[in-house]
Amino acid sequence: MEELEDVKQFLPTTADVSDLRFEASDIVIYTDSKDFFLDNSETVKKMVSELKKRVEVRPSSKLFKSPETAEDIINDTIDDKAGVEEVIFQPSLGKVIIRAENPGNVIGNRGSGLEEIKEKTLWSPQVERVPSINSKIVDRARELTVEDPEFRKQFLHDVGEKIRLDKSVGEEWIRLASLGACRQVGRSCFLLQTEESNVMFDCGINPSAEPGSTENFPYLNAPELNLQDLDAVVLSHAHMDHAGMIPYLYKMGYDGPLYCTKPTRDMMIMQTLDYISISHKENQSAPYDSSDIKKAVKRTITPEYGEVTDITPDMRLTMRNAGHILGSALCHIHVGEGLHNILYTGDYNYDSSEMLRPADTNFQRVETMVTEATYGGNNDEQQPREKAQKKFLSKMKQTLNKGGKVVVPVFAIGRSQEILGMLADEIGRDYFDYPVYIDGMIKDANAMHTAYPEYLSEKVQKKIMKDDDSPFLKENLHSIGSYNEREEAIEGGPCVILSTSGMVTGGPIMEYLKYLAPEEKNSLIFVGYQAEGTLGRKIQNGAER
């Protein structure tokens, strides 16, 4: 294509290029030249400046050393303090992924460690942080992200070619259709269309609907939507009311890219696998299976915050921190050459919370905004965060002092980490020497947070870097993994119990209510939204039984 021809004019005669191809909106150059692989920064800088595209140079299979030799070199080069756990080679992409407990020790001062590995092995190194908490679900999620690199290489090239198709000349128009979420909490799904493109934002479930009912899913049978014509799906964050039906799209024939941040991708895997597991335990049929999740992951593209990414011939996506949960994003679409700018917010938060930085709304232009409004009704009144936290801690202290248990229904991702962050500041004070139990998928979500500290606030980043101060590794924090451990929490002394589900629609929270609700000395504290129709809302509205 013309854009690849433009790249060639910047290449020196010594570049010895073996392959030149698209990788979604990026351009990748594979070279047989050791010198060009190791020293290409000036050439790439000129290309990026002129073409306004990201460009990467990778080694061809003729250049890099064998995986066995390269792994020996990597192990000899990296300091033992790095805690290297796994080295994964992807020959078709010329990449080696190094998973380590302390990535900084691999990267080195100003990237010197990576440069040394690159020079000695002639592979392109990439570093990932190993979670400081063991989690089989997180391990499974990460396995899926590196499967079938040969497929990924071809898929990303095909996506890149579609993005660069010549735009047809015709009438310019934009249509935005709601396929869910409006006038209700749940099943968020929107369809953005132009003459050129069809892009979906989110595809979630309705947490308060009966499993299997049509009220549980977005209107995917809407006349505007044809999955075969869908060019891209953009996922704002991994809560099930936004992400729960993403694998179903792939089951029903969608075969295109899914755009989201890396933490959102990994937590979407975790949440949807758990959704299947819970459905089976409750003798319900899930709308998809693990093979559909795998299809989605193999087609996921993960832009960084602030990167401008072409996703169709006439749409560019920019994601910025939404401050809601780990990896959550405000999604900005620039349509055409300055025709229109649309911002889809998903959930967002302007406060500096226990875990995250506030939302970043640094967008130059927005003509249309689709905003989440769960707490935005005429009669909604939000307490200041500080006041709400004081009330929580006061009620918790009262309950513990009289020998009771504090039961807190929480969402596994987001609210549970906020509460743990708040409790971590109390731990060590004279009054607080009580166990804190976490049940459900909270431990796995905590593990994911320790794998991506760069997405958290600076305060929490520093604490995670020092394991002895991490809010996820406090001595009195106990993860429940069996019925016996749950029984211990129920029958033992005063304690705090954080358990899913956050709206009391199922999961281990039901066991705690069953045994602990009759005792007047115990307390139930809601810390998240209780959707209409859920058991949490019924209790909140005053139901006594």
Image (cartoon, rainbow, N blue to C red):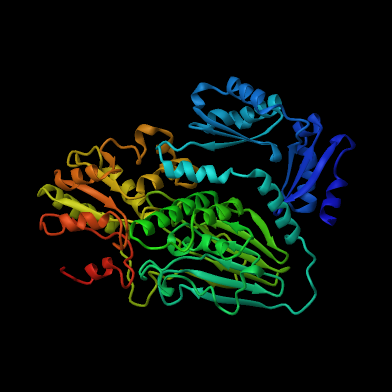
415 to 39, vertically: above or below? below
Q: Position of residue 181 (x, y in %)?
A: 46, 72
Q: Quadrant of the C terminus?
A: bottom left
Q: Is residue 269 left or right of residue 312?
A: left
Residue 364 seen by the camera: no
Q: Give the residue drawn at x 80%, y 46%.
A: 20
429 to 164, vertically: above or below? above
Q: Residue furthest right?
A: 13
207 to 398, vertically: above or below? below
Q: Position of residue 112 (x, y in %)?
A: 63, 28
Q: Closest to the observer: 401 or 207?
A: 207
Q: Is residue 24 left or right of residue 367?
A: right
Q: Position of residue 211 (x, y in %)?
A: 38, 67
Q: Position of residue 406 (x, y in %)?
A: 20, 52
Q: Give the residue drawn at x 24%, y 49%.
A: 497
Q: Quadrant of residue 228?
A: bottom right
Residue 536 seen by the camera: yes
Q: Give the residue drawn at x 52%, y 63%.
A: 248
